[in-house]
Image (spheres, coloured by chain):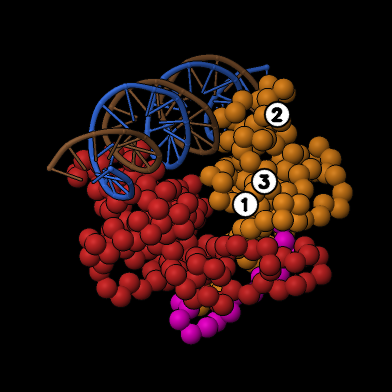
Chain colours: A red, B orange, C blue, D brown
Amino acid sequence: MVRLSRPTLDDLKTQLRASNLRATAPRIAVLRCLHEATTPVSHAELAEKLAPDGWDRATVYRNLTDLTDSGMARRSDHGDHVWRFELQNEAEAHSDGHPHFVCDECGDVSCLPEGSVEIRSQKGAPARLKERVATIQLKGRCERCV
Amino acid sequence: MVRLSRPTLDDLKTQLRASNLRATAPRIAVLRCLHEATTPVSHAELAEKLAPDGWDRATVYRNLTDLTDSGMARRSDHGDHVWRFELQNEAEAHSDGHPHFVCDECGDVSCLPEGSVEIRSQKGAPARLKERVATIQLKGRCERCV
DNA sequence: GAAGAATTGCAACTGTGTCACAACTGCAAC
DNA sequence: GTTGCAGTTGTGACACAGTTGCAATTCTTC
């Protein structure tokens, strides 16, 4: 997922208000971190990163779920029992989104291009499977850990 | 995953010893439950099911991980922060295994036929993706929850 | 049957995620 | 600029899945 430009403070505030969320300091901090992240980030990572600024663990958690509920972020669990968050890409917002690849070894999570995984109708498969799938996740060894 | 016949006590003992595991009562009970299960089972479900027999939660946990480590079972996390276990199918042991479908709504986990999900080499996708994938998971609404 | 190693039961612990509630604050209306 | 108040925050406590240490027990081998 590519971020073309670093958003200004005003950009972030506008984004939040457009989603009916108040532009509070901790919320802006959380949103900014998501903008800066190149891969999905966990609650814990973000809480730790923001702790020096005085923002509480629970506040970070709540803001992440707020952003998710409002559709600005996407939440996923990549199999290591930790929720990870990333900004919702506008272009993907109304599609199935892209598949994720999670490394069993290093835990690294990366985004795969849309279309790199195909769901096929097959005998034995449940009806209308493809239409019902919302997210796709692959696990294995990443290129560095092979 | 289809179990053609219910294994006898001796079958189970033999299976365990073949994997260098002692055939203890709780371990046999765990293995039998996995044989009887039609979908992946969680630690907690199994521990609860076996509690009346007097087997301890930690013992069930340890046995599940033992079976997994020895290759008899397969462990997966389907996005609800719970490990689920199922028997490792011989035929799948050295392949990617079958994909799983997890319902966002009711949390139900079901097994999909192998081949119902295809990984395609595509521009933008990482090299040798297909070879590196160990497990595949789809999430969405199940047939009952649509 | 005895010895030794693997396994068990218990209880305490870790870490992620949630919640209730009182105090605070952004922001829209005046 | 001030005010009112719904939305938000910090705190502390909690639920839950999963893990660990250790003494007691049990399986396997000889």
Identify the subunit bearing mark 3. B
Q: What is the x, y in percent for residue B19?
A: 65, 47
Residue C2 in picture, x, y percent from top left: 60, 19
Is disc 2 placed on a helix, strand or loop?
helix
Residue plotted at (43% across, 48% down): A65
| Residue with the most extreme right position | B5
Determine the residue positioned at 61% across, 38% down: B43
User: For mark 2, does the 10 Å Cα neighbourhood hold few (<14), some (14 to 19), or many (20 or more) residues?
Assistant: some
Relative depth, front residue between A53 and B48: A53
Q: Which residue is mark 3?
A: B106
Identify the amino acid type marked 1: Asp
Residue C9 lies, with reference to residue B74, above or below; the image says above
Reading the image, the residue beneath label 1 is: B104
Tag 1 secondary structure: loop
Q: Where is residue B88, by image quadrant?
A: bottom right
Same chain for labels 3 and 2? Say yes or no.
Answer: yes
Res. A86 visible in picture: no
Residue at x 85%, y 44% (from the top left corner)? B6
The residue beneath circle 2 is B50
Could you tell whether A40 is left or right of B4 in the image?
left
- Does B142 appear in magenta? no
Give the answer, above or below, for where B144 lies relative to C14. Answer: below
Kindly identify the residue that appears in the image at 25 percent across and 69 percent down: A6
Q: Which region shows up in magenta?
A: B111-127
- Chain at tag 1: B
Judge whether A15 appears above or below B69 on screen.
below
The Cα–Cα distance between marks 3 and 1, rounded to whole angstroms, is 6 Å
